[in-house]
Image (cartoon, rainbow, N blue to C red):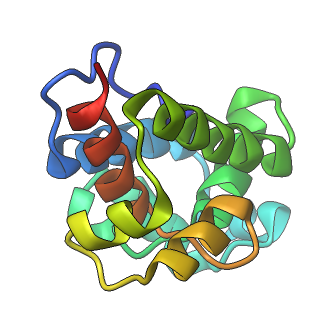
Amino acid sequence: MLYDAIADPEGATAGDLLAAYATELAAAVDGADPATLAEETGVDEAVVAALATGEADAVADVRLADAAAVLEPAEGVPAHDIAYEVRDHLMMGMVTAILDVDTIAAEIDVDLTGQEVQQALEGRTRLTLGELAEIQALIVERAP
C-alpha cells in the first residue's frame, strides 16, 4: 500500500520510492479502461491514464487521495483508509527517525513549509506522490 511498495527500503532514494509507487499503481489499473475506472473512482481520467503508464515522472504530481482511490478496488480497502494508513506510517517513521515537520521541510527537495508538511501528514491538504516519496526517503535515511 504505497508505504511498503519497496520491501526493504533501506538506502532507497525518493526516485526509487516514486518508481515503486508508479509500478504498484500501474499494476492496480492494469487492464482497466481508464474512462470506466475514472468514473468509478472519481479520479480524473487523465490521472488514471498517467498511473497506467507506470512512469515515475507521470505520477509525481498525483495526489495521495487519487492514488488511494485507484488502489481501493485492487486492495479491497476504502481509499480513505489507504490514505490514512500511508500518513500514519509516515508519522510513526518520524517518531522512530526523530524528525519533526520543520526538519522535514528543510531537508526534502520540495517547496513546503513545516506547517504545510504537518497539514499534509494530517490529511488537511494535498500530499502528492512526489512529496510522499521525498518524505519517506528522508525518514528511511534517518531511521536507526
Tell me what residue is drawn at x 41 percent, y 47 percent: 99
Q: In this view, does 1 lie above or below 26?
A: above
Q: In this view, does 95 lie above or below 102?
A: above
Instruction: Count up the numbered dots.
Output: 0
- Name the quadrant containing residue 9: top left
Q: In this view, does 112 lie above or below 131?
A: below
In the image, 23: left or right of 62? left
Residue 49 x/y as whole percent: 46, 68
Residue 86 x/y as whole percent: 62, 41
In the image, 111: left or right of 107? right
Tell me what residue is drawn at x 56 percent, y 80 percent: 115
Residue 114 x/y as whole percent: 47, 76
The quadrant in which the C terminus is found is top left
Tell me what residue is drawn at x 69 percent, y 33 percent: 74
Extreme residue in the top direction: 8
- Name the quadrant containing residue 129: bottom left
In the image, 18: left or right of 109? right
Tell me what residue is drawn at x 39 percent, y 44 percent: 21
Q: Along the line of sight, which residue is nearer the eye, 90 or 70?
A: 90
Q: Is residue 108 visible?
A: no
Q: Can residue 121 be seen in this view?
A: yes
The quadrant in which the N terminus is found is top right
In the image, 4: left or right of 14? right
Q: Along the line of sight, which residue is nearer the eye, 11 or 81?
A: 11
Residue 130 x/y as whole percent: 34, 65
